[in-house]
Each structure stands twice: as C-alpha cells, then as structure tokens.
Image (cartoon, rainbow, N blue to C red):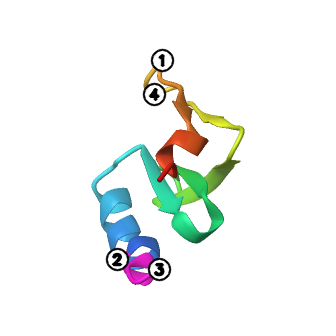
Amino acid sequence: PSTEEMDRGLKMETYARHGVPEYWMAIAEQEAIEVYRLDPAAGAYRLIATYRRGDRVTTPLLPGLSIDVAQIFAV
C-alpha cells in the first residue's frame, strides 16, 4: 500500500514512455494481480485483466507462462 501511488503514477508512466508492453501490479490486500497492456496509440496502459485466488496469470508475451495467483500470496 505504501508504494501504490508511485506504482500507479510515475512508475507506470515511465514504463509506458519507454514502451514496456505489459505492466503487472500485485495488490496484496486484495490478493490480486492486475495486468495492464500498453496502448501505443494512447501511450498509456489499459487494464486488461484482474486475477485472483483460483486464477492463473498468463500473457501472450510469454507463451507457456502460467502463474498460480494463490502461490504468489502464500505465506
């Protein structure tokens, strides 16, 4: 929570400006992963999915990658 403002602001804007195609954000208090994809025309990220426990995070940028959200937040 202490870095969320920076993560959603300056950090996200910087990554977009440099053309990073996807931006993933872990939201610990919600046990969720938000996946944003760069919209080159807008020069900004758009939220494409929110993954929660029971979901597996995937991306077409890394075929074969599949991450269990529950394991990310396991203690």
Q: Provide the residue designation for mark 1.
A: 63
36 is within the stretch colored magenta = no
Q: Is mark 2 on a helix, strand or loop?
A: helix
Instruction: Name the one closer to the observer, 61 or 72.
Output: 72
Tell me the mark number nearer the camera, choosing from 3 and 1. Answer: 3
- Report the span colored magenta: 1-6
Amino acid identity at mark 4: Leu
On residue 61, which mark appears? 4
Alpha carbon separation for disc pair 4 and 2 = 24 Å
Residue at 35% in and 47% down: 20
On residue 10, which mark appears? 2
5 is within the stretch colored magenta = yes
Tell me the mark number nearer the camera, choosing from 4 and 3. Answer: 3
Alpha carbon separation for disc pair 3 and 1 = 31 Å
Q: Is label 4 in contact with label 1 (beta carbons under 8 Å)?
A: no
Amino acid identity at mark 2: Leu
